[in-house]
Image (spheres, coloured by chain):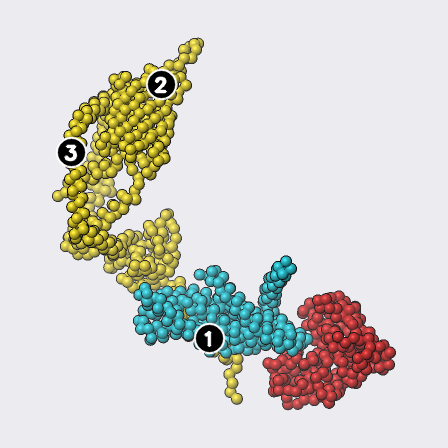
Chain colours: A yellow, B red, C cyan
């Protein structure tokens, strides 16, 4: 009887298994068989995010090799590519990291160099790297954003259009009319008040002028040192002139470069091709050309930028205020000026940095010890001295607590806000020197118009020599206003 | 010579061998009798090293089996042959291969010689031309014969028989007894037989040992045992219900 | 109170039993390793077991592999169609087969077929004193009986897995391309793109581990059988259950380790 032995059966089975395994291995990974063949070149990318070991290397969409390894070198990604011997790369090929489709894998595309040039040898590096902004993907995103905008505007038009929309717009207009009428009445009734306010403003500018005059000397100094600096610059320019003269005469490497005819020719060619490229772009050829010339793209882009702007504004809670405040001290017939920058990272939290001029000047205390005599303290007032404010404030509902530097001394303050922040009552205590009473100040601030405030109060009211009631005006600009001022300045265009 | 010294063995709480001492003479057939489940098979397994005693010594030609490692035990086991109760033939092999197994394992001889020895041993147990049969095709008696042929294949000095006649008809039992006697004489074997078949005991045994409650209570020639007035032996030989051996 | 004590008692006993059993299996494995390197090497026995474990399991493995691949293709198709990614069916089937289902289903089938047979055969040998006979004839049963089975398991299960992977992918191809009209070129291209060599080889390493588990557990249960025919039946059942559970649990850990 013919029978197959166990050994034969097992052998046959194992053989079949090995063939199937070999077939599958060959199908899924040919690299298993081309292992360690071919040659390697290196390329350095700023960012190899998403690129992985064994990622494809393609030329004209044809896979020719694999990424052998990726490692960090001097803060850049050094990628080693394995290529078969029959694929030769010119020295001036360009490598770029690209992506398959929307969610696809990253791969390296090699853009051919000059035909007939020298070839890269094993171990050499590809020096040209293209930083690929994926235009297709960007356009896709722009298009989807444009769709969103279109949807918003269409829903808006639905709201506006029709009978109900018309009615509500009518109502809004009517309200506006009533409002202006009321406003007019307010202005007429308060003419006298307004006049007084303008008078105050005049005084304020006078004060400002005085500040400038007081600091005249210092400004002069600054101008003097600027002059010195510019004379230095002059010398520098002179030596630069010398260098350029040298270049013109053909001295030095740079000079030779400029004089070289071939170099000039090449430069000319470069210019010409640049011209060609820009012409193409103008004509709307190529992706960039289309991007530039296509009105719809531009519109989409504008819309996108608008959206981004809005988004940034909304998300940005960060606000800054600049304010100037002049206080007329009735007892001294002199004015005190404040220039404050208020930085408000959150609604209930701010930093305040400021400069203060005080007619009394800055108080300094000096110890004077004559030879063999007893030490005496002398208090001096430096009239030209600027005082500083540097405070941190935190708001709890209607109260604001401030602390830090008040007029160059340590102190604290408490503000009470009422009538929807139109009225502010404030109390400050600072300059807790041993030899005199603390500097206390109480007052109020009333919002008159959006940017103009009225102030009144009593400064340093427990020091007889220095106490004085005050009245004043302050101007305050929020960053929105500044932004408006800046952005509404017309930018010259052709 | 096999010598058992003060063997203790328990399974869990049950004491099976309790300070057992026994000397088995060379070239003789010693039959160990006792009740079913009385520890006869356990005793046999101790002799060949399948079980190790809790304490005590098993001396085979002066070597203590209980102290040997697997390799040394395998070496000393080549002196032994054993016929199991159900013959314990390998189901997956035919008769010839079963008998050839110990030869293949241990004798460094050619295949042709192996088959000559197999045929010779099978002839010795009264079988011819059964090499190609599978164990499942054989009757109980034939299986025991094949088992005996396998046990003596390597020409051992000692052969152990675990109830050789159990489950056989009287004629076949007698044939097996005859075979044991002949084999013992032909190969000059030391035989250890455990049995409770009274007829066989006196037929084949030169010496008889009675195992009772974990110890050998009597040891002697057939005549001595037959003449014993030990009530346990009397009751056992008579097969009587009345006596010191209690039926559980 | 006494009931509570009894519950804890039995719980403790079963945990202790499980730990003890695990320890015994590991000891058996060590003993298999040590006997594996000692001559004589019983090539005949190994081949016999390889035939039994490998060659005779081909039919059942091909059948399960093929239908698993077909079902995966069918199920995957309905899932991927929601994302218009029907062409991914091929790679889903291929990855699923090579990484998981190939090794696991193959070893479960081999457990049911050969692992149980090992337990039954060794169990029968144990209760009919054939294993004692081996000892008596100075042939170590671990070396004679268990080593060839374990070797056969470790070698043949991976080969069966290769076959299972392959026919599974074929089955998926048949359903995907012939029945569900997925483009055949894209189907195959996605397979070759998504499946890595490591997927196949890690699957085979798993299969080898499972082969070890099923043969070792089968042999252990058979080798420790007691109680006659009933004991053999119990050993067989326990072997299949224990081996299957161990395979599935170790699959998790092997997967966590590999992928």
Chain-order first, disc 3 or disc 2 = 3
Residue C47 shown left or right of residue A438 in the figure: right
Residue A85: x and y in percent read 34, 63
Helix, strand or loop under label 1: helix
* Residue C96 higher or lower than C128, as above or below: above
**Badge 3 is on which residue?**
A184
Q: Are marks 3 and 1 on the same chain?
A: no
Residue C128 shown left or right of residue B59 in the figure: left
Q: Are marks 2 and 1 on the same chain?
A: no
Q: Could you tell me which chain the residue with mark 3 belongs to?
A: A
Residue shown at 29%/60% (left/top)?
A101
Q: Which quarter of the figure is the C terminus of chain B placed in?
A: bottom right
Residue C12: x and y in percent read 61, 60
* Residue A345 higher or lower than C85, as above or below: above
Residue shown at 81%/82% (left/top)?
B238
- Which of discs 2 and 1 lies nearer the camera? The answer is 2
Residue B236: x and y in percent read 80, 79
Residue shown at 69%/67% (left/top)?
B69
Q: Could you tell me which chain the residue with mark 1 belongs to?
A: C
Q: CA distance from mark 3 to mark 1?
A: 95 Å
Residue B217 found in image quarter:
bottom right
Q: CA distance from mark 3 to mark 2?
A: 44 Å
Q: Are marks 3 and 2 on the same chain?
A: yes
Q: Which mark is residue C84?
A: none
* Residue at the top extreme, as displayed: A372
**Badge 1 is on which residue?**
C61
**Badge 2 is on which residue?**
A462
Name the one closer to the observer, A105 or B190.
A105
Residue A319: x and y in percent read 29, 37
Helix, strand or loop under label 3: helix
């Amino acid at each position: 009887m013919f029978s197959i032995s166990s050994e034969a059966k097992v052998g046959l089975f194992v053989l079949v298994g090995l063939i199937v395994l070999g077939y599958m291995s060959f199908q899924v990974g040919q690299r298993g068989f081309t292992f360690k063949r071919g040659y390697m070149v290196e390329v350095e990318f700023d960012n190899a995010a998403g690129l992985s070991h064994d990622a494809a290397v393609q030329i004209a969409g044809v896979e020719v090799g694999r990424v052998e390894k990726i490692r960090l070198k001097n803060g850049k990604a050094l990628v080693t590519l394995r290529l078969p011997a029959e694929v030769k790369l010119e020295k001036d090929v360009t490598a770029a990291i690209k992506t398959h489709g929307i969610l696809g894998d990253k791969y390296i595309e090699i853009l051919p160099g000059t035909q007939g040039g020298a070839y890269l040898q094993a171990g050499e590096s590809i020096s040209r790297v293209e930083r690929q902004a994926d235009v297709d993907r960007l356009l896709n995103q722009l298009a989807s954003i444009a769709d969103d905008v279109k949807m918003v505007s269409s829903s808006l038009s639905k709201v506006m259009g029709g009978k109900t929309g018309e009615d509500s717009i009518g109502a809004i207009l009517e309200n506006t009319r009533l409002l202006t009428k009321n406003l007019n009445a307010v202005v007429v009734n308060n003419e006298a008040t307004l006049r007084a306010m303008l008078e105050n403003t005049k005084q304020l500018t006078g004060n400002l002028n005085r500040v400038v005059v007081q600091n005249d000397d210092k400004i002069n100094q600054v101008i003097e040192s600027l002059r010195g600096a510019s004379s230095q610059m002059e010398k520098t320019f002179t030596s630069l002139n010398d260098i350029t003269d040298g270049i013109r005469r053909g001295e030095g490497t740079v000079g030779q470069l400029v004089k070289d005819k071939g170099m000039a020719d090449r430069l000319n060619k470069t210019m010409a091709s640049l011209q060609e490229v820009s012409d193409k772009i103008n004509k709307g050829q190529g992706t960039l050309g289309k991007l530039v010339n296509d009105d719809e793209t531009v519109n989409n882009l504008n819309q996108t930028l608008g959206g981004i702007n809005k988004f940034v504004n909304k998300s940005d809670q960060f606000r800054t205020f600049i304010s100037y405040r002049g206080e007329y001290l009735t007892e001294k017939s002199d004015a005190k000026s404040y220039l404050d920058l208020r930085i408000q990272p959150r609604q209930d939290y701010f930093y305040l940095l400021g400069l203060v001029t005080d007619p009394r000047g800055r108080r300094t205390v000096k110890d004077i010890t004559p030879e063999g005599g007893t030490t005496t303290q002398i208090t001096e007032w430096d009239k030209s001295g600027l005082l500083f404010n540097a405070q941190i404030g935190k708001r709890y509902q209607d109260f604001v607590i401030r602390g830090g530097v008040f007029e160059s001394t340590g102190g604290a303050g408490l503000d009470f806000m009422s009538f929807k922040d139109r009225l502010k009552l404030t109390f400050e205590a600072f300059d807790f020197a041993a030899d005199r009473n603390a500097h206390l100040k109480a007052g109020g601030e009333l919002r008159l118009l959006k940017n103009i405030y009225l102030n009144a109060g009593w400064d340093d009211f427990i020091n007889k020599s220095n106490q004085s009631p005050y009245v004043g005006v302050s101007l305050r600009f929020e960053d929105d206003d500044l932004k408006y001022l800046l952005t509404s300045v017309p930018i010259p265009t052709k | 010579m096999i010598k058992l010294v003060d063997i203790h063995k328990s399974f869990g709480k049950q004491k099976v061998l309790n300070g057992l001492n026994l000397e088995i003479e060379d070239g003789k057939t010693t039959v160990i009798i006792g009740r079913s489940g009385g520890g006869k098979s356990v005793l046999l397994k101790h002799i060949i090293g399948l079980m190790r005693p809790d304490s005590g010594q098993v001396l085979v030609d002066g070597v203590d089996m209980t102290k040997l490692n697997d390799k040394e035990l395998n070496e000393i086991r080549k002196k032994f042959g054993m016929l199991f109760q159900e013959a314990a033939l390998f189901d997956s092999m035919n008769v010839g291969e079963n008998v050839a197994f110990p030869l293949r394992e241990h004798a460094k001889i050619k295949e042709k010689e192996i088959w000559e020895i197999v045929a010779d041993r099978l002839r010795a147990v009264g079988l011819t031309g059964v090499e190609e049969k599978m164990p499942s095709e054989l009757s109980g008696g034939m299986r025991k014969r094949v088992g005996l042929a396998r046990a003596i294949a390597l020409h051992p000095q000692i052969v152990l028989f675990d109830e050789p006649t159990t489950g056989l008809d009287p004629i076949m039992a007698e044939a097996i007894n005859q075979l044991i006697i002949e084999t013992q004489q032909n190969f000059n074997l030391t035989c250890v037989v455990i049995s409770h078949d009274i007829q066989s005991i006196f037929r084949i045994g030169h010496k008889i040992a009675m195992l009772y409650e974990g110890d050998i209570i009597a040891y002697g020639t057939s005549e001595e045992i037959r003449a014993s007035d030990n009530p346990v032996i009397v009751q056992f030989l008579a097969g009587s219900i009345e006596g010191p051996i209690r039926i559980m | 109170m006494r009931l509570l004590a009894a519950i804890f008692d039995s719980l403790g006993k079963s945990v202790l039993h499980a730990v003890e059993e695990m320890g015994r299996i590991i000891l058996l494995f060590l003993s298999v390793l040590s006997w594996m390197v000692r001559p004589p090497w019983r090539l005949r026995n190994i081949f016999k077991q390889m035939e039994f474990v490998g060659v005779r399991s081909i039919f059942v493995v091909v059948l399960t592999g093929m239908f698993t691949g077909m079902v995966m293709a069918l199920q995957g198709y309905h899932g991927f169609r929601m994302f218009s990614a029907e062409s991914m069916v091929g790679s889903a089937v291929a990855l699923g087969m090579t990484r998981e289902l190939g090794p696991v289903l193959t070893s479960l089938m081999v457990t049911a077929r050969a692992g149980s047979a090992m337990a039954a055969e060794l169990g029968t040998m144990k209760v009919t004193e054939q294993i004692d006979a081996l000892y008596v004839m100075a042939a170590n049963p671990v070396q004679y009986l268990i080593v060839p089975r374990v070797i056969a398991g470790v070698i043949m299960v991976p080969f069966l897995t290769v076959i299972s992977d392959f026919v599974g992918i074929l089955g998926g191809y048949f359903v995907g391309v012939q029945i569900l009209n997925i483009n055949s070129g894209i189907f195959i291209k996605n397979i070759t793109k998504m499946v890595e060599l490591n997927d196949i080889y890690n699957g085979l390493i798993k299969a080898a581990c499972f082969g070890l588990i099923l043969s070792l557990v089968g042999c252990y249960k058979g080798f420790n059988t007691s109680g006659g025919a009933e004991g053999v039946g119990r050993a067989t059942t326990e072997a299949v259950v224990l081996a299957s559970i161990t395979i599935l649990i170790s699959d998790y850990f092997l997967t966590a380790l590999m992928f």
